[in-house]
Every structure is written in structure tokens, then in C-alpha cells.
């Protein structure tokens, strides 16, 4: 895999373009003005029975390439389901899962998985120093921005998430499986996710990372280390 590197100025220019995209200019799913997701946790629990085989009985998945959902922001989960419904990627096991979910079911599932206690990270006892450094400070020479500005100091979510639903469409990363995180970053690099305004924020950032940086970041995020 050849890493695409953008100078920081180019990245900032791209972010500015995103910020000024006119609403309705394309099929873009514009997540800038989203509202808080409300749903029925108990109904979500019932509907979640079919999800457990892959995402675990309490939203902590037994397979490292399947994401944990427990404790994730409901807004993030809901809009991912919405995107998966629109993307219809045949290679994703999620395509068949979301096909029959209506809007109410997606809301119920999102609030249910969000209400569950997040996975307690136990992996990665030898935490990645490079990953920690990249996460906190980025790497100006490679055009990598610090991740913490958008995902929180300890990867617990955007620092303003409690106040505004918009920031809750930015995912919590702490404790997520490294294998899943690495795959997701490579998918962003390869332009697999372009449907939403948030995809267009994360795509150019992922394209600043080389394979070694991805491995280091994923290892650090999976670990309990602060
Ligand atoms: C057959 C296995 C399987 C089943 C069953 C399944 N999922 Fe998934 N899910 C995955 C995989 C694999 C991914 C990784 C994303 C991809 O394919 O792009 C994923 C991704 C997701 C994501 C995105 C998470 C993120 O961090 O971006 C959500 C939300 C989700 N699943 C919810 C559900 C819900 C709700 C159900 C039940 C209705 C469900 N899944 C059933 C395998 C499964
Ligand atoms: C300018 C804000 C911003 C910065 C900086 C940023 N991200 Fe993101 N990131 C986002 C947004 C928004 C999303 C949600 C994209 C979507 O809706 O799929 C995201 C999604 C992700 C995901 C997908 C998580 C999942 O559960 O599927 C990963 C992994 C990720 N970011 C890692 C990183 C890493 C590593 C860095 C630092 C190199 C970083 N991000 C820097 C905004 C940012």
C-alpha cells in the first residue's frame, strides 16, 4: 500500500471545502446539523438478538475484525447504520443486516448499544509509544493532524460531545479492536466511505497515514493506556 501524503495546508484546505459545501449540492449525507437520537432501549435490546452473533452478547465483539458497539455514541451508531443502508456494499456482512431495518429500529438499536458499558480494554499491555505520540500530537512533517482534537484526549469521544449531538457523530475509539480500526483506516484511505460529510473529514486524514502509523495508532487505541 502506498501512503498518500498531503501537506498540512492541503488538508486544511480540504477541511475548509467540506465546511462550505452547500447543503443539497450532491447525495452527501450532511451530518453538520443533526439532532440527538432518541429511541427505546428495551425495544432495541429485543431487536439486537440478531446482532449478537457478531457484535457479542453485550456489544463487545468476540472477533477482532468486528467492531465493539457498547458505549459508542448513539448518534454515531445510527448514522453508520443509515450509511450502511445507502452504501449497499456487497462485501460487508452489514448490508444484509440493515436491509430490513426501518428508521425506528435503527434508533432503538443505536440507543440500546450506546447504553451498554464500553469494553474494558485489556489488550496491548505493551502500549505503542509511537501510537500515543501520533494520537496526541500528530506528525507535522507527514501532514498528520493530532487525532485528539476530534476524538478526545483519551479517545473517549469528541471533547464537546456532551453538549451537541453533532459531535456525537464523531466516534469513541478507546478500547476498539485494533484489527477493526486498522481495516477501517485503510478503507478510508481507499475511498470506500464517501457518503457523509464526516466521511469526507476522515478520508483525507487517513490518507496521511502509512501502514506503520496505522499499526501504531490501532495498537494504542486498543490498549488501556492513557
Ligand atoms: C454477520 C456478522 C454481523 C452481524 C450479524 C451484524 N454485524 Fe454489524 N458489523 C459487522 C462487521 C464485519 C462490521 C464492520 C463494518 C463493515 O462491514 O463495513 C459491522 C459494523 C457495524 C456498525 C458500524 C460500527 C462502527 O464503529 O463504525 C454498526 C453500527 C453495526 N455493525 C450494527 C449492527 C447491528 C445493529 C446489527 C444487528 C441488527 C449488526 N450490526 C449485525 C458484522 C455484523
Ligand atoms: C477533524 C476531525 C478529525 C480528526 C483530526 C481525526 N478524525 Fe477520525 N473521524 C472523524 C470523524 C468525523 C469520523 C466519523 C466518520 C464516519 O462518519 O464514518 C471519524 C472516524 C474515525 C474512525 C472510524 C471509527 C469506527 O468505529 O469505525 C477511526 C478509526 C478514526 N477516525 C481514527 C482517527 C485517527 C487515528 C486520527 C488521527 C490520525 C483521526 N481519526 C483524526 C474526525 C476526525
Image: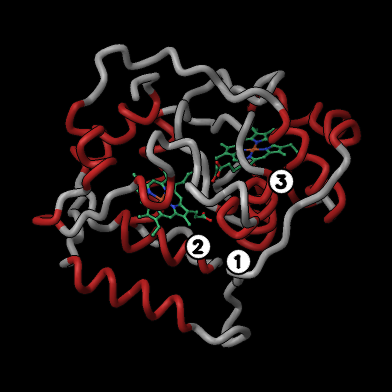
Ligand 2 under 8 Å from disc 2 Cβ: yes
| Ligand 1: image quarter | top right
Give the quadrant of residue 117: top right
Asked if residue 69 lies left or right of residue 154, the reply is: right
Residue with the mark numbered 3? 96
| Residue drawn at 32 percent across, 63 percent down | 204
Give the quadrant of residue 206: bottom left
Q: Residues within 10 Å of mark 1 (few under 14, many from 20)?
A: some
Between the residue at mark 3 and the residue at mark 2, the CA separation in whole angstroms equals 23 Å
Please give the count of numbered marks on the rendered protein. 3
Ligand 1 under 8 Å from disc 3 Cβ: yes
| Residue drawn at 52 percent across, 17 percent down | 120
Ligand 2 under 8 Å from disc 1 Cβ: yes
List x then y, in percent, for residue 186. 35, 48
Residue with the mark numbered 1? 31
Helix, strand or loop status at disc 3: helix
| Residue drawn at 20 percent across, 60 percent down | 4
List x then y, in percent, for residue 95. 66, 49
Amino acid at each position: 500500500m502506498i501512503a498518500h501524503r498531503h501537506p498540512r495546508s492541503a488538508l486544511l484546505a480540504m477541511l475548509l471545502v467540506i465546511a462550505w459545501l452547500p447543503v443539497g449540492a450532491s447525495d452527501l449525507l450532511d451530518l453538520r446539523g443533526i439532532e440527538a437520537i432518541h429511541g427505546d432501549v428495551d425495544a432495541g435490546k429485543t431487536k439486537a438478538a440478531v446482532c449478537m452473533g457478531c457484535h457479542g452478547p453485550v456489544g463487545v465483539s468476540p472477533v477482532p475484525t468486528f467492531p465493539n458497539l457498547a458505549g459508542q455514541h448513539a448518534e454515531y451508531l445510527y448514522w453508520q447504520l443509515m450509511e450502511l443502508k445507502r452504501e449497499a456494499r456487497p462485501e460487508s456482512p452489514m448490508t444484509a443486516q440493515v436491509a430490513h431495518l426501518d428508521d425506528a429500529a435503527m434508533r432503538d438499536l443505536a440507543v440500546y448499544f450506546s447504553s451498554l458499558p464500553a469494553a474494558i480494554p485489556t489488550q496491548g499491555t505493551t502500549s505503542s509509544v509511537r501510537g500515543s505520540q501520533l494520537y496526541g500530537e500528530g506528525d507535522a512533517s507527514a501532514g498528520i493532524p493530532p487525532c485528539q482534537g476530534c476524538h478526545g484526549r483519551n479517545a473517549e469521544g469528541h471533547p464537546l460531545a456532551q453538549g451537541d449531538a453533532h459531535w456525537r457523530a464523531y466516534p469513541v475509539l478507546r478500547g476498539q479492536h485494533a484489527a477493526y480500526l486498522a481495516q477501517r483506516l485503510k478503507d478510508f484511505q481507499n475511498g470506500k466511505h464517501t457518503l457523509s460529510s464526516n466521511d469526507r473529514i476522515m478520508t483525507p486524514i487517513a490518507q496521511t497515514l502509512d501502514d506503520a502509523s496505522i499499526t501504531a495508532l490501532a495498537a494504542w487505541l486498543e490498549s488501556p493506556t492513557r
